Image (cartoon, grey):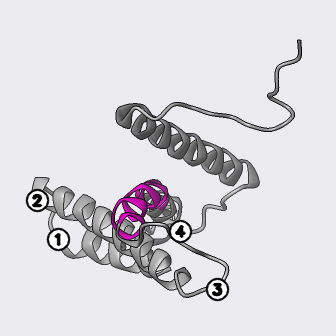
């Protein structure tokens, strides 16, 4: 809700051009990190959460968690962008539109998280009974 308002303000208040595009994406990056950091900070006082290294959790953990918002903030904004367009204002958003958009954004988040994992050289370890080998 707040992110959509801020992104709509940036999108509607400035003339088209590369500077507006840069401002729009820097706003998304800032909002993503800020939201992730504040969520990490607020849950740190919850008695059932414990961080071994708070600095690492606040800085790198928030950056990694912010990947979710890097995709979802512009996704939510563009999903409702037809509201401002007078020609498409009455266009209904179908359940298929919603489902397809949600699946696409979920896949983008999964890919970005996996690219970061590969870049950092972290091996993929899947545990549990379903992935146990028999022999």
What label sits on residue 14 in the rendered view? 1
Q: Quadrant of residue 121?
A: top left
- Stretch in magenta: 56-72
Describe the element under mark 4 as helix, strand or loop.
loop
Q: Look at the numbered disc 3 and give the secondary structure of its residue.
A: loop
Instruction: Give the residue at mark 4.
Output: 89
Front-lying residue, 34 or 11: 34
| Residue topped by disc 2 | 19
For this view, does 114 lie left or right of residue 107?
left
Q: Earlier in the sequence, mark 4 or mark 1?
A: 1
| Between marks 2 and 3 in the image, the one whose residue lies nearer the viewer | 3
Mark 2 or 1: the one toward you: 2
**Label 4–label 3 contact, CB within 8 A:** no
- Report how far apart the C-alphas of labels 1 and 3 lie in the structure: 45 Å
Residue 36 to residue 69: above or below: below
Look at mark 3 in the image and give the residue it sits on. 47
Residue positioned most to the top:
135
Q: Which residue is at a point 61% across and 61% down the rendered structure image?
A: 91
Q: Earlier in the sequence, mark 4 or mark 3?
A: 3
């Amino acid at each position: 809700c707040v992110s959509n308002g801020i992104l709509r303000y940036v999108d509607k208040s400035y003339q088209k051009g590369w500077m507006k595009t840069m401002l729009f994406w820097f706003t998304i990056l800032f909002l993503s990190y800020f939201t992730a950091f504040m969520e990490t900070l607020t849950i740190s006082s919850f008695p059932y959460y414990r961080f071994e290294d708070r600095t690492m959790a606040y800085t790198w953990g928030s950056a990694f968690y912010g990947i979710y918002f890097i995709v979802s903030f512009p996704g939510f904004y563009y999903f409702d962008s037809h509201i401002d367009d007078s020609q498409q204002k009455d266009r209904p958003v179908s359940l298929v539109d919603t489902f397809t958009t949600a699946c696409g954004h979920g896949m983008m988040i999964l890919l970005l998280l996996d690219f970061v994992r590969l870049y950092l050289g972290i091996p993929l370890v899947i545990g549990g009974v379903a992935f146990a080998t028999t022999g």
